[in-house]
């Protein structure tokens, strides 16, 4: 979903019904992602909704499922 400088994830509250929101430290910022999905079709369907909700630059990214404690 994106790279943000602060850990205020309340701005993603309108996405919690679509999946779990994860974050990981990336230098001085946090990489935020939404998932986990069962395949590309499922991810692309959710991506359409994410973009409609105001995150036009969101993109799919294949990766291993993050651990719950990575938040």
Image (spheres, grey):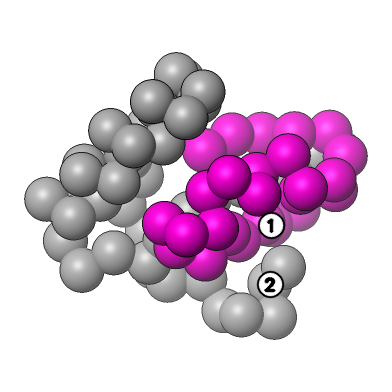
> Is the residue 68 above or below the residue 64 in the image?
below
Q: In the rendering, at what x and y percent does residue 51 appear?
A: 39, 27
Q: Is residue 30 visible?
A: yes
Which residue is tagged 2? 70
Secondary structure of the residue carrying tag 2 is helix
Q: In the rendering, at what x and y percent does residue 43 appear?
A: 25, 50
Q: Residue at x 66, y 34 (%)?
A: 3
How many numbered circles does the render carry?
2
In this view, the residue farthest toward the top is 56
Q: Which of marks 2 and 1 precedes in the sequence? A: 1
Q: In which quadrant of the rendered view does residue 23 lie?
A: bottom right
Q: Is residue 43 left or right of residue 14?
A: left
Residues tagged 1 and 2 counted as in contact (Cβ below 8 A): yes
Q: Is residue 70 left or right of residue 58?
A: right
Q: In the rendering, at what x and y percent does residue 35 appear?
A: 42, 61
Q: Residues within 10 Å of mark 2 (few under 14, many from 20)?
A: few
Q: Is residue 14 magenta?
A: yes
Q: Is residue 23 magenta?
A: yes
On the rendered image, what quadrant is the C terminus found in?
bottom right
Q: In the rendering, at what x and y percent does residue 49 appear?
A: 34, 37
Q: Is residue 8 left or right of residue 47?
A: right
Q: CA distance from mark 1 to mark 2?
A: 6 Å
Q: Is residue 31 visible?
A: no
Which residue is tagged 1? 24
Q: In which quadrant of the rendered view does residue 44 lie?
A: top left
Magenta residues span: 1-27
Q: Residues within 10 Å of mark 1 (few under 14, many from 20)?
A: some
Secondary structure of the residue carrying tag 1 is strand
Q: Residue at x 60, y 61 (%)?
A: 22
Mark seen at residue 41? none
Asked whether 63 or 10 is in front, the reply is: 10
């Amino acid at each position: 979903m994106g790279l943000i400088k602060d850990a205020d994830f309340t701005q993603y509250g309108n996405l919690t019904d679509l999946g779990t929101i994860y974050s990981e430290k990336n230098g001085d910022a946090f990489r935020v992602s939404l998932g986990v999905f069962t395949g590309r079709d499922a991810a692309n369907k959710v991506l359409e909704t994410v973009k409609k909700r105001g995150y036009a630059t969101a993109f799919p990214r294949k990766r291993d499922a993050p651990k719950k404690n990575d938040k």
